Amino acid sequence: MNKDFAQLEKELAGMIFEFSEETWSNHTDGTIKDLDLFEDLKYDSVSLVDLLISLEEKYDAELTGDMSDLIDNLDSLEQFMDYILEKMGR
């Protein structure tokens, strides 16, 4: 994994926790990617949209195309980060 990609992943995780009711310090690096966006991180559809809009603005990427599909199919932090990175072309 190259350094830029690892840094981008860490940046994304930081923003995800910033919009969450949970704090990163409550989890180990090994368990963070297994967290559930809705149950563990307490996201709801509104907070998820807020996060996606912030990510779109920061990375100049289209991320909010089909929100219902996103909400229905992505649960873990790892799946969500993979989705974001794919949309960003990484």
Image (tube, rainbow, N blue to C red):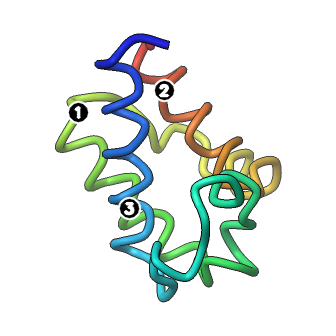
**Which of the 4 quarters of the picture holds residue 45?**
bottom right
Front residue of 18 and 10: 10
Relative placement, left or right, of 51 versus 43 is: left
State the residue at coordinates (81%, 55%).
72
Q: What is the C-alpha distance between the residues marked 2 and 1?
A: 10 Å
Return the disc, 2 or 3, that comes first in the chain's sequence. 3
The answer for how far apart the CA atoms under marks 2 and 3 are is 14 Å
Circle 3 residues within 10 Å: few <14, some 14–19, many ≥20: some
Q: Position of residue 16 (x, y in %)?
A: 43, 61
Q: Is residue 33 left or right of residue 26?
A: right
* Label 2 Cα neighbours within 10 Å, binned few <14 / some 14-19 / many ≥20: some
* Amino acid at dot 3: Leu
Residue positioned 44% across, 53% down in the render: 13
**23 sits to left or right of 33:** left
Residue 7 in picture, x, y percent from top left = 31, 32
Q: Which residue is mark 3?
A: 51
